[in-house]
Amino acid sequence: MSQILKREVVYAITGIVTVIMFLEYFFFPESTPWAEMIRTWTVIVYNISLGLGAVRLVMAHSMSVQRKRENWQYSGLLLATLAIMGLTGFAGYFMTGQPTQNAIYNWMFVNVYTPLGATLYPITGFYIFSAAYRAFRARNVDAALMLIAGCFVILSNAPVGEAIWLGFATIGEWFRFTGQIPGMRTFSLVGTLGMIAYGFRALLGKERGFYAGGGED
Amino acid sequence: MSLLAKIDRRVFYWILFIALMVPFLNPIGFPIRIMENTRDLYEGITGDSVEPGDVWILNFGYGVSAWPECHPGVTVCAKALLREGAHVILIGPHTDVELTYNHLLDTVQEDFDAAEYGVDWVFLGYITGGESAIAQLASNMRSVYPTDHFGTPLDDIPMMANVNTWHDVAGVLSSDTGDWGGYFLTMWQEAYGVPMAQIGIAMLGSTGIPRWLAGNYFGMSVGSRGGAELEMLIDEPGDAIIAMDSISVSHLLIVIAVILGNIGLLIEKGRGS
């Protein structure tokens, strides 16, 4: 029985859902209450998975703290932050209907999360600058072509490029608006064809990577 | 040259840090040329392209970390739509969507003050469920958002009274760091022909520009540069125009670093041969 639940029922559900969504998207976009119902379930399952993810996160990091694994202090910090945000957010929600009405929750979000988040991208600029000197080397013709194209694109994106020489903008824009287009379109088409092939394999029960037990036929 | 090869990486960090300080202390003001994709975006949300009362979805597909790249463009688009009399639905798939919404209330303060919540704009809040949720939003918004972010049922919000499917939406603007623009493209633009445009981070230019050239997006703003161009188009200089000097300096330094690094490589090769 469990094998049937694990395999055949999963194959059947996958197949039915695939057929319904396929028919809706390509043939009956306005009249498919079943497809709507399935999508609503999907949204509900997604939301449940957020809660499940939080539970798994707590379990994994609690274990890390309990067993004093490497860098367990970070796990402790994560759990403490999770507890503070969770408790204050729920307190705000139950008292006012808005989590952000809790002063501690709001303070943490605005004064801790926001600066940390805002720092995330800019900090990569420093690594890129260092890497530009150390790693971006034209060791062969392919690498040299890529680097030259990259330099033109960078200088066409920054106003200073045009200020130095108008040609930087002209050549860089050619790469952005003409040169890269065939490559990106080919990439998109190949990726989409791969997705269609994957969909058909899943529909036929041949793609088992996401089924219980995994593996391929 | 061997000395150059051994430079500590912290030296590079300091060079960049100091160089970035200069334009903030003493703005340079390099001229910014407006690209065609950005102009198309602006023209698609202003003038004859927008009728008063049209409903537009503005998706915050970015978190706090991408504020510098995405938010200036979103600010200009929100201003433009409100000034045209359009009604704006604000949604976002990031957990910090409320921060972004509050930030938008600050950056578009005058226009939001002149408008009325629930009549001219509505904040539906966080959305999860990936592509399925975006598809469902097209066929039945109330099944995804029974209430707005503040708990008011959509039926009680005047602006949403007759808005429930893609038929009721004039266009979509998706500001992204990742996939959400693609979801709207597949589930709204390609499926039903709803006009859409993207306000993406610079990295999304390579995927977004082919879509703009193909006509899937009626326009596209690429990174801070796109935001600066939009600020110029609406004639209200803001954060993106200020940031462009820093972008000029950092980009130039990166190119110089690449050139210096490769000169070293060539000299080493010359010695070897």
Image: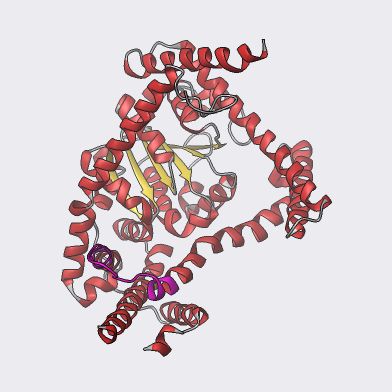
Q: Position of residue B63 (x, y in %)?
A: 53, 50
Quarter residue B163 falls in: top left
Q: Is residue A151 left or right of residue A117?
A: left
Query: Majority secondary structure of the magenta segment?
Result: helix
Give percent across and percent down for residue A63.
79, 47
- Residue at x 43%, y 47% (from the top left corner): B176
Magenta segment: does it hold A142?
Answer: yes
Q: Residue furthest right?
A: A66
Residue A27 lies in what quarter of the image?
A: top left
Give the left or right position of residue A111, taking residue B169 as reference: right
Q: Position of residue B158 (x, y in %)?
A: 51, 27
- Residue B72 visible: yes
Magenta span: A130-149
Q: Residue B232: where, in percent of width, then height?
A: 31, 61
Query: How has the structure been colored for display?
Result: secondary structure
Work out whether B127 lies above or below A79: above
Residue A97, magenta (yes or no): no
Query: In the image, is residue B209 above or below residue A127?
Result: above
Q: Is residue B238 visible?
A: no
Q: Residue at x 36, y 50 (%)?
A: B204
* Position of the N terminus of chain B by quadrant: bottom left
The front one of B60 and B254 is B254
